[in-house]
Image (cartoon, helix red, strand yellow):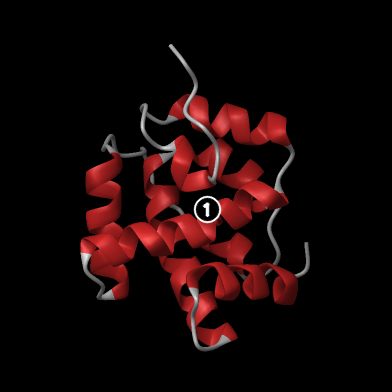
Amino acid sequence: MRLDDFLTRVRDRGEYHSQEEAEQVSEAVLWVLASRIVPDEASDLASELPAPLDDVLRLERGTPESFGREEFLRRVAQQTGARPRTAEWDACAVLSTVSDSVPSGRLSHLLAQLPPGWADLFGRPEAEG
């Protein structure tokens, strides 16, 4: 997917005023996601996304941190200056667009690394367990 297509989807889903706002939110969400997943997974995901968004996932962060959905949203809110509820909206706008951009197998592999309760952020139903 091209950058302008990706950002248009994020802008429409997040109801942002501009492509620039959509890009800022996308970078913030992807930056926090990259701190949660292993570097190889971040690199694989980056290979599916348009530049410069791919670079956000390739930044060296070392060992991934282990945190849940609420902490993820708190960190997104911190990055964007938003309230936690708005951060959830932002994360859904970006991650559902990521979901549209990557093969389903790669997305399944990514979701398998995350604790339960994340699939809906990617616009996917939770796996029954």
Visible residue check, residue 21:
yes
Q: Nearer the viewer, residue 123 or 3?
A: 123
On the image, the x and y values in percent for residue 42 come to: 55, 45
Which residue occupies the extreme right position in the image? 1
Visible residue check, residue 59:
no
What is the quadrant of residue 6 in the picture? bottom right
Q: Nearer the viewer, residue 84 or 81?
A: 84
Q: Nearer the viewer, residue 2 or 91?
A: 91
At 21% from the left edge and 68% from the top edge, which residue is drawn? 83
Q: Give the answer, above or below, for where 72 lies relative to 83.
A: above
What is the quadrant of residue 118 in the picture? top left
On the image, the x and y values in percent for residue 78 come to: 23, 67
Q: Give the answer, above or below, for where 90 lies relative to 111.
A: below
What is the quadrant of residue 77 in the picture? bottom left
Which residue occupies the extreme top position in the image? 129
Residue of label 1 = 95
Q: Is residue 59 left or right of residue 104?
A: left
Mark 1 closeness class: few <14, some 14–19, many ≥20 residues within 10 Å: many
Q: Is residue 81 left or right of residue 39?
A: left
Q: Give the answer, above or below, for where 101 lies relative to 113.
A: below
Q: Is residue 104 left or right of residue 83?
A: right
At 22% from the left edge and 47% from the top edge, which residue is drawn? 71
Q: Amino acid at mark 1?
A: Leu
Q: How many marks?
A: 1
On the image, the x and y values in percent for residue 63 come to: 36, 38
Quadrant of the image containing the C terminus = top left
Q: Nearer the viewer, residue 41 or 88?
A: 88
Quadrant of the image containing the N terminus = bottom right
